Amino acid sequence: MSLRFRLAAAALFLGLGGAGAAQGLETDQFFAWGRHLDDMTEVLNARVNLELERLVAELNRDGRERRCQNVRFRFFKRHRMLFFDGFETWSVNSPLVSRSPSGPEEMREFERRYLYGGTSPLFDTGRWMPPSPTVEVNGVRLGTDKLTHLLGTAWYYHRWYRKASLRGATPAEAEDRAVRRGLQHEITILGRAVSGVLSLADLEANYEGMWFYEHLCAGDDPNIVYDAGVWRLRRPFDLRAYVTPEWDESYQPNIYVRRKWEKVKQRMLGYCSMLEHPQVKAMRQAYRERDRVTETERLIDEMVVAGKLPDPSGFSIERVCREAAN
Amino acid sequence: MLSRARWLHIAAGAVLCGLWAGSLVGQEPRNRASEDPRPLTDRVRADVDETSLRWLGIARVRYSIPLEFSAGGGAILARMPASHDCATFCEYRGFVAQVEPGSAGGQLGVGYARVIAANKPRSAFLNNVYVGWSARAVLVRTWGDSELDPARQTLAGFEGQFALPRISFNVGVLRRVSSAHEGADRYVYTAGIGWGF
């Protein structure tokens, strides 16, 4: 085999791994346990609404009615970056956003305690990308990567939903097709096959984002309307309508491949004592009160029953700590 | 025609310029969050819109045709939100310049880059490149054991680079601008694989 051929093969192999990892940022909500975080609902809402206002101004500069799908794409394009998302990039940098880890000292501590820190930084493609810090929204702690899922990845969910609808599927059938296709993507190129992690929280955010795009400029209660020759922001974006406790990866456990789970479990054990911390106890109690069975959970249950996925409850902190105690 | 020693001087000079500039211009983000009395929407707007120019050093090592093993140093100049520290990651979009001496030639490149990367506090370099691309106009001088015929020639052309974590690749096309014997190839197609940006 010539050197040039080997170079090309190596580039293709490593490139595919990297490209997959790029949209699969990992996050660690355990690290934020017991740490104070200000609620960022209003701040993040203000950031998204600023972009919606600018979209409206852009549409009015054009001065004519446009198809809703075109409006959706324009919004998606405004914050799309190279593999990453503008809202997430802003939220991990802005001094207006309270997040964890934050500041050099906490960043160093995070490097030591990161849930995925036990895996090889060379061979674990999930670690080739920066971990997403944790923020708090409406009482729920979530990785900033969820903004990418809600407003970025969900664009593709919505396209699948729309495609199925245009082919004559009922809204329920179209939703089902989009969610199943999204799960396949998360299992293969975006998640489990590349980084060894299937994040159910990511799927939840994708699902909610699909409805955000659907209702952005259509339906009974759209965000943006074309009214009397003028585009306007009729209903501001509000994260509270989308975020649920299932977005917290310390509450809604991920599904791991075996090689990764062995290492993650060891790190997770370090948090067992924190289950009794007042902040953690109160937060998890509040989560339980708000918890409901989501569409994503129904689909995962179906896959578990069919033997296609392991039961996510086996990867929960409660199970890990219980097994360790026995 | 530039001598090999001259190329090396240019390379060293450019790297030092990159480091100097990176250490001077707008590296410390401003933190105005705590005492700003403006309404939240105005603060968010200001945080998005108030920008500053930043220089950051870039470096790469690679194996490529026709430079063979090479190491490059340079800088990227990008307009960024002024308050962002980029310790986790930022998007840098802007002008890029790099010099790159190698075992079989040297290259000077200038162009446009778009890259998602992080830089550690007080570092003058992009420390982690996660994904990015650049399009550059390049000037190449080959020397030593170059496989080109003739071994010493000057070429000009374009190079495209795509970077992912741990790896970057490039392709391009060069046109010979120095004189050569009859029958020598006028165009050279380039390709490379390496680390860095």
Image: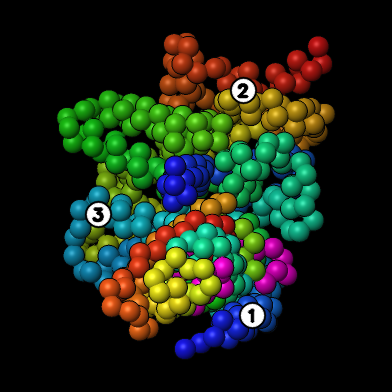
Position of residue A26 relative to residue B91, above or below, is above
Q: Quadrant of residue B111?
A: bottom left
Position of residue A193 relative to residue A91, above or below, is above
Q: Quadrant of the N terminus of chain A?
A: top left
Inspect the image, locate mark 1, and give the three-letter code of the amino acid beneath it: Ala
The local crowd at label 3, few if under 14, some if 14 to 19, many if 20 or more residues have their Cα within 10 Å, is few
In the rendered image, residue B81, in percent from the top left (x then y), is placed at 55, 71
State the mark number for residue B173: none
Q: Is residue A162 left or right of residue A298?
A: left
State the mark number for residue B12: 1
> Which residue is nearer to you in this view: B102 or A110?
B102
Q: CA distance from mark 2 to mark 1?
A: 49 Å
In the rendered image, residue A93, in percent from the top left (x then y), is placed at 61, 61
Q: Is residue A211 visible?
A: no
Q: CA distance from mark 2 to mark 3?
A: 43 Å
The local crowd at label 1, few if under 14, some if 14 to 19, many if 20 or more residues have their Cα within 10 Å, is some
Mark 2 vs 3: CB contact within 8 A: no
In the rendered image, residue A166, in percent from the top left (x then y), is placed at 18, 36
Chain containing the residue with disc 2? A
Say which residue appears at 56% left-offset and 81% top-offset. B4
Along the polypeptide, which appears first: circle 2 or circle 3? 3
State the mark number for residue A70: 3
Stretch of the chain drawn in magenta:
B100-124
In the rendered image, residue A164, in percent from the top left (x then y), is placed at 23, 32
Chain containing the residue with disc 3? A
Q: Is residue A76 left or right of residue A322?
A: left
Say which residue appears at 66% left-offset and 55% top-offset. A98
Say which residue appears at 74% left-offset and 58% top-offset. A103
